[in-house]
Structure formats: structure tokens, C-alpha cells
Amino acid sequence: MELKQGFDLAKPPLMKLLLVQTASQRHHLVWTTHHLLLDGWSASQLLGDVLRHYIGQKATRQEGVYRDYIAWLQRRDTAASESYWRQLLGQLHEPTKFL
């Protein structure tokens, strides 16, 4: 249902949380967000903070961490990264189904 609704960038919300009960003692939290809001690095930081809070730990904030991440990306061997992904994705012979 969420996928069919999509996102209208001119209308909130661009992030949604949906709690689904799948059994009497089992729940799934579905987090839907537009990629314009968070990149992969920021999403992992946010989710890490949420999970730390959930288990009672204080969220940690470090200055300059994103800058360090960008510097790490710039130091990476782009040819090796491309080779890795071409090998991995080369095993796919048709588009994958997106649910």
C-alpha cells in the first residue's frame, strides 16, 4: 500500500512509520522515507541512534563524522569498487522485482 501511494514532494509526510502486528507477540516496524531526506550514511546514523535509545543507551554525537565519511569515500579505490559491483551484479540476468 505504501509503495503504491508514493511520495508527493509538495505534501508531507516524506517519512512514515507503520507498526504492523503479525502475531500476538510479534510486530514489524515499517519505516518509509524519501531518499531526498536521508542518504545511506545519515539513515544508518539515525537508525543507530533510535536502536541505542530503544535499549536505554544514550545516543552518541561526534563532530565531523560526516566529513570523515566523505574523506574515506574519496580515498577508496574506485576501480576495485566498480569491479566488485560489476561481478556481484553480473550474476543478475534480468531486473529484480521490487516489492
Image (spheres, rainbow, N blue to C red):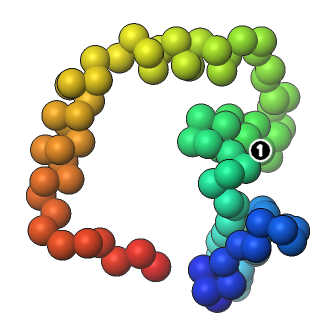
Query: Is 38 drawn above or below residue 7 in the view shown?
Result: above
Q: Is residue 34 above or below residue 3?
A: above
Residue, x 26% and y 72% (percent of image)? 95
**How many dots with numbers?**
1
Q: Given the image, on which type of amino acid does mark 1 rest?
A: Val
Q: Residue 73: give x, y in percent of width and height.
A: 45, 20
The answer, for residue 56, to whether it is visible in the render is: yes
Place residue 87 in its image quadrant.
Answer: top left
**Position of 76 relative to 25 (above/below):** above
Instruction: Identify the residue at horizontal 46%, vertical 79% (top origin).
Output: 99
Q: Is residue 92 left or right of residue 34?
A: left
- Note whether 78 is above or below 47 in the view shown: above
The one of 91 and 82 positioned closer to us in this rendering:
82
Determine which residue is flagged by label 1.
50
Identify the secondary structure beneath mark 1: helix
Q: Residue furthest front?
A: 10
Does residue 60 appear to the left or right of 3 in the view shown? right
Question: Percent from the top left, x then y, of residue 64?
Answer: 72, 12
Q: Quadrant of residue 67?
A: top right
Residue 28, how many percent across, how many down? 65, 71
Which residue is at 77% across, 44% downward? 50
Q: Could you say which quadrant of the image residue 1 lies in?
A: bottom right
Residue 55 shows in this picture: no
Q: Residues within 10 Å of mark 1 (few under 14, many from 20)?
A: some
Seen at 16% across and 34% down, the residue is 83
